[in-house]
Amino acid sequence: MLILALDAAMDACTAALCRDGAVEAADSAPMRRGQAEALLPMVERVCAAAGAAPGDLDGIAVAVGPGGFTGIRIGVAAARGLALGLGRPAIGIATTEAIAAAQPSVGGPLFVAVETKRADLYGALFPEGWAPAAAIDPATAPFAVAPEALTDRLGPAGAEPLRIAGDATERAGAALAAAGRAWSPAGGPAIATPEALCRLAAARFAQALAAGETPPPPPSPLYLRPPDARLPAASAGARPPGGPAS
């Protein structure tokens, strides 16, 4: 199965072409802004590098968040647009799942902490032996949490230090340490890798199709809090849209 995997949800932009869960071609770059201009040219480059045409794709996968609002929208819009234009199914992958899949398999639960650049952080707890389900599992779904509330949200400590991964590892670890809870870095990358995206995409498509979801539900942005931007409040003398000028 030939799948295009996209990720613009965090401080990077990635496109990977995957065949049966293995990377055939990938392009990725650190990027806080500019994903809208970078993502589709990346798609063109990875298809050209693999000698594949867009019509050869069997499906499209995209990281749906949590992460930056703009990057999430860009990735999901690109995936849905390509899926619609090509007549192919598209699926969503949680950013936290993709980061978890990129970590070494050394046993024990794993907490993925994603930076919000605000007072809170995004997180998801994955039990030992976690494997992706046909859709984002409510048991491992990401959540927003204040660092000082993290120990309560995670529940009782296990016998081993909790492994933490993600770009908010140090902040989450400091909060746990302040509460007297042991932790250790998971040792893998802080963001999703093309290899992790491809493995998850292949597994999710296979499980969704096995569950009879043909095609699977299209991906939607996974936002954990409302956007900071707000429309300006209408002034008392403002005319309604389309109304006559005074």
Image: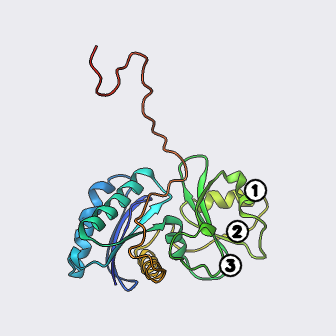
Helix, strand or loop status at disc 1 = helix
Query: How is the protein colored in the picture?
Result: rainbow
Say which amino acid is labelled 1: Ala
**Picture mark count:** 3
- Percent across and percent down for residue 37 are 27, 55
Disc 2 to disc 1, C-alpha distance: 11 Å
Instruction: Compare marks 3 and 2 and give the one earlier in the sequence.
Output: 3
Q: In this view of the protein, can residue 18 be seen by the observer?
A: yes
Q: Which mark, residue 183? A: 2
Q: Which residue is mark 3?
A: 108
Helix, strand or loop status at disc 3 = loop
Quarter of the image that includes the C terminus: top left
Horizontal side of 14 relative to 54 (left or right) equals right
Query: Looking at the picture, does residue 230 appear above or below residue 6?
Result: above
Helix, strand or loop status at disc 2 = strand
Q: Which residue is mark 1?
A: 178
Horizontal side of 130 relative to 7 (left or right) equals right
Disc 3 to disc 1, C-alpha distance: 21 Å
Q: In this view of the protein, can residue 102 be seen by the observer?
A: no
- Percent across and percent down for residue 25 are 30, 78
- Percent across and percent down for residue 172 are 65, 59
Say which amino acid is labelled 2: Trp
Horizontal side of 126 relative to 214 (left or right) equals right
Identify the residue at horizontal 49%, vertical 41% (top origin).
Answer: 228
Mark 3 or mark 1, whichever is nearer to me: 3
Could you say which quadrant of the image residue 182 lies in? bottom right
Mark 3 or mark 2, whichever is nearer to me: 3
Q: Nearer the viewer, residue 44 or 143?
A: 143
